[in-house]
Amino acid sequence: MSSIHLHHAHSLSPEQARSALSDLADSLARKLGVESRWDGDNLHFQRSGVDGTIKLLPGEVEIAAKLGMFFAPMKGMVEQEIRRVLDEKFR
């Protein structure tokens, strides 16, 4: 099993950050077929072989994901997509 753990600083309001994270979840749904749901300030996403959480913290987003055997070889692509959307949405 492979894992991804990222931190990304931001200066958005909680509402703006939540909207940006919803955009990230939409991107992951298109690229990986994950389903997501909010639990307070945590956005959980999963599908067979992918399980992760995005925590919306004051001034920071923390992303932790576990990739199963099928997705482990694609770790770089998954991490790159997450970073791309974070850089785009959390300027």
Image: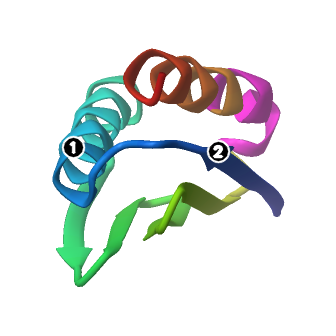
The span picked out in magenta is 71-78
Query: Label 1: which residue?
Result: 16
**In this view of the protein, which residue sits in the foreground, 20 or 5?**
20
Q: Is residue 74 positioned above or below 41 on the image?
A: above
Magenta stretch, main secondary structure class: helix
For numbered disc 1, what is the local secondary structure?
helix
Instruction: Characterize the local packing of mark 2: few (<14), some (14-19) or many (20 or more) Cα atoms within 10 angstroms.
Output: few
* Image height of 45 relative to 28, above or below: below
Position of residue 55 measured from the top left corner of the image (x, y, whole percent): 48, 69
Question: Is 73 included in the stretch rendered in magenta?
Answer: yes
**Which residue is drawn at the image coordinates 24% and 33% (left, top)?**
23
- Give whichever of 19, 14 is nearer the camera: 14
Residue 4 placed where, x, y %?
75, 52
Which of the pair 70/43 is nearer the observer?
43
Q: Nearer the viewer, residue 3 or 53?
A: 53
Instruction: From the image, tell me which residue sits under label 2.
Output: 8
Judging from the image, what secondary structure is the residue with disc 2 in?
Answer: strand
